[in-house]
């Protein structure tokens, strides 16, 4: 398991919440980011990090598709 950090970014650029979750791989981390967007409706996107490396973003539009 790898530990990922998910930052919920609002449209104004603020980050009022974050989540730290172990996931087996990047695909599972992407699914977790999509879940967080569904739970935290104010999030415009979720930044996904592993340690000090920013891996990818999941936007609300991507998660809805």
Image (tube, grey):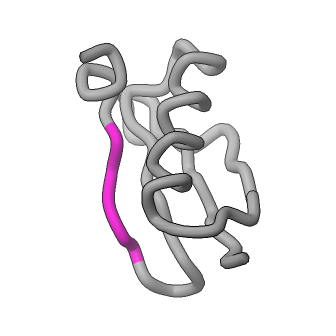
Q: Which of 3 and 9 lies nearest the eye of the viewer?
A: 3
In terms of secondary structure, what is the magenta stretch mainly?
Answer: strand
* Picture layout, residue 42 above or below residue 14: above
Q: Quadrant of the N terminus?
A: bottom right
On screen, residue 19 above or below 17: below
Which contiguous range is marked in magenta?
Answer: 54-58
- Indicate left or right for 24 with 9 as reference: right
Image point (44%, 56%), residue name: 27
- Seen as rendered, the residue at the extreme bottom is 52
* x then y, percent, for residue 51: 59, 84
Please report the residue visible at 74 percent of the width from the left and 65 percent of the height from the top. 22
Magenta run includes residue 57: yes
Vertically, is 50 above or below 56?
Answer: below
Residue at (48% x, 32% y) in the render:
34
Quadrant of the rendered image containing residue 65: top left
On the image, the x and y values in percent for residue 37 come to 52, 26
Residue 61: percent from the left, percent from the top? 25, 20
| Res. 11 image quadrant | top left
Residue 52, x across and y down, in percent: 52, 86
């Amino acid at each position: 398991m790898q530990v990922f950090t998910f930052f919920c970014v609002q449209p104004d650029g603020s980050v009022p919440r974050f989540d730290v979750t172990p996931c087996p791989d990047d695909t599972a981390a992407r699914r977790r980011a999509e879940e967080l967007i569904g739970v935290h409706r104010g999030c415009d996107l979720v930044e996904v990090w592993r340690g000090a490396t920013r891996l990818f973003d999941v936007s609300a539009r991507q998660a809805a598709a």
